[in-house]
Image (spheres, rainbow, N blue to C red):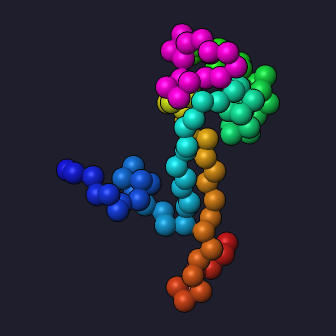
Amino acid sequence: MKPNQNQNPATEAGFNNENVKYSIVEVYPSTVKELALQYRVDYRTFTRWIEKFEYKVGQRVGRYYSVKQVEIIIECLGAPYEVGEVEPEKDKGAKKI
């Protein structure tokens, strides 16, 4: 089956809740502190997380992880995103619980 370019990525993954937001992660060369901020943890905690799969990520060049390394980190840790509710439209008669 060919992916539909207009289809919601959450729907493609089998998640059909219309009240959930999704975001696309922009990948760029990043420092440990920048990545820790995206995952909302202290940089020391993030460093401990990275140690578990450092063999996959490899060594940083200077202070920065390359784009490929950041992609591997996201693959291992998951995307740093937030799940939130979208305000329901008033004409649908949805109730807040």
Q: Residue 54, how many percent across, how many down?
A: 58, 13
Position of residue 94 in the picture relative to residue 97 (left or right): left
Picture residue at 68% right of the left edge, 32% below the top: 35
Q: Residue 18, how many percent across, how many down?
A: 49, 67
Residue 36 is a magenta residue: no
Picture residue at 54% right of the left edge, 66% below the top: 19
Q: Nearer the viewer, residue 42 or 96?
A: 42
Picture residue at 62% right of the left edge, 15% below the top: 61
Residue 14 shows in this picture = no
- Image quadrant holding the C terminus, namely bottom right
- Outermost residue toward the bottom in this view: 91
Q: Examine the residues drawn in magenta and state their main secondary structure.
A: loop
Q: Residue 63, how many percent across, how many down?
A: 70, 19
The relative height of residue 57 versus residue 21 in the rendered view (above or below) is above
- Outermost residue toward the front in this view: 62
Position of residue 4 in the picture relative to residue 69 (left or right): left
Residue 67 is a magenta residue: yes
Picture residue at 51% right of the left edge, 15% below the top: 56
The relative height of residue 36 versus residue 5 in the rendered view (above or below) is above
Q: Nearer the viewer, residue 56 or 85?
A: 56
Q: Which residues are magenta?
A: 55-69
